[in-house]
Image (tube, rainbow, N blue to C red):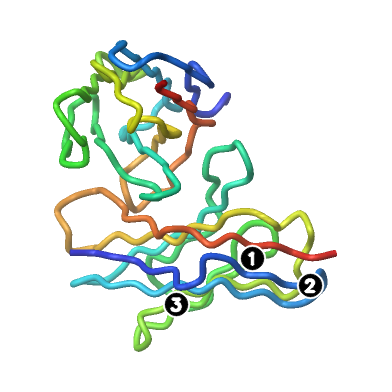
């Protein structure tokens, strides 16, 4: 298995632009998580899905952030419009049965908003 | 609410010496506890977990962790550190009684193994 796949690996954009991050979870995993990592705030859970349904989006910082999971093998995290404070590394993770189980993390997308 | 604390931002240890990375937690029910490691420019990788059973949990790369319920701790240990163990280590917890599936991560401890 290729593991969790994220794209792009790096993204540089200008303030106000739309940014879309993509994730392909491990096949057969029921849960998908989006995290944001910054030096100041550490690793924060933004949202998670179970069987493609968003379960908890309380970590999404603002309405500028949205996430979708149209099918079991694909999820997106969109920021529109982007701001410099959104600069961070965004990780996608998946797991088989939820929080009791190991989460498998993707390599992350390093986002820089100028 | 569940929480986890890693009191040390950085731990330095000489190669070959034993290492300990500390973690304490707070939950209302029984805890599920995890350790993950992050190498530079990589995602987090699972090391070990405690769900139930023996208090001493063995994991990947020779790491182990001891669950101590009375001290609400789950310290990560290794008998002999390697330079390649240098990385960022995260402790994480989930409350068994919680209705949510989300895990709370600590702020991370940078481990530096000195040759």
- Extreme-right residue of the structure: B115
Q: Where's residue B72, x and y in %?
A: 35, 80
Q: Is A104 on the left or on the right of B1, as rendered?
A: right
**Location of residue A42 with respect to A109 vertically, above or below:** below
Determine if residue B109 is in view.
Answer: yes
The residue that disc 1 covers is B63
Q: Are marks 1 and 3 in contact (CB under 8 Å)?
A: no
Q: Secondary structure at mark 3?
A: strand
The residue that disc 2 covers is B14
The tag earlier along the polypeptide, 2 or 1, is 2
Q: Where's residue B102, x and y in %?
A: 27, 49
Are discs 1 and 3 located on one and the same chain? Answer: yes
- Extreme-top residue of the structure: A17
**Location of residue B94 with respect to A23 vertically, above or below:** below
Q: Which corner quadrant holds the N terminus of chain B? A: bottom left
| Residue drawn at point x = 17 percent, y = 59 percent | B98
In which chain is the residue bearing label 2? B
Q: Is B98 on the left or on the right of B26, as rendered?
A: left
Query: CA separation, marks 1 and 3?
Result: 13 Å
Query: CA separation, marks 3 and 2?
Result: 25 Å
Q: Is B15 on the left or on the right of A91, as rendered?
A: right
Dot 2 crowding, Cα within 10 Å, few <14, some 14–19, many 20+: some
| Residue drawn at point x = 44 percent, y = 68 percent | B6
In which chain is the residue bearing label 3? B
Q: What numbered label is drawn on residue B67?
A: 3
Image-quadrant location for residue B11:
bottom right
Q: Is B10 on the left or on the right of B23, as rendered?
A: right
Q: Of the residues tagged 3 and 2, which is closer to the observer?
A: 2
């Amino acid at each position: 298995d290729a593991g969790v796949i994220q794209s792009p690996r790096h993204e540089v954009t200008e303030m106000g632009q739309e940014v879309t991050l993509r994730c392909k979870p491990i096949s057969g995993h029921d849960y998908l998580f989006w995290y944001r990592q910054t030096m100041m705030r550490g690793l924060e859970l933004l949202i998670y899905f179970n069987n493609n349904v968003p379960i908890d989006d309380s970590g999404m910082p603002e309405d500028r952030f949205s996430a979708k999971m149209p099918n079991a093998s694909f999820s997106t995290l969109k920021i529109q419009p982007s701001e410099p404070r959104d600069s961070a590394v965004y990780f996608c993770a998946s797991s088989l049965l939820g929080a009791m189980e190991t989460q498998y993390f993707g390599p992350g997308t390093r986002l820089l908003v100028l | 609410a569940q929480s986890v604390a890693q009191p040390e931002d950085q731990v330095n240890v000489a190669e070959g010496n034993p290492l300990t990375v500390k973690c304490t937690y707070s939950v209302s029910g029984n805890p599920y506890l995890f350790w993950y490691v992050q190498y530079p420019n990589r995602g987090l990788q699972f090391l070990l977990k405690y769900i139930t059973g023996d208090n001493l949990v063995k994991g990947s790369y020779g790491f182990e962790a001891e669950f101590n319920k009375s001290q609400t701790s789950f310290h990560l240990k290794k008998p002999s550190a390697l330079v390649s163990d240098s990385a960022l280590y995260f402790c994480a917890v989930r409350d068994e009684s919680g209705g949510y599936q989300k895990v709370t991560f600590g702020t991370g401890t940078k481990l530096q193994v000195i040759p």
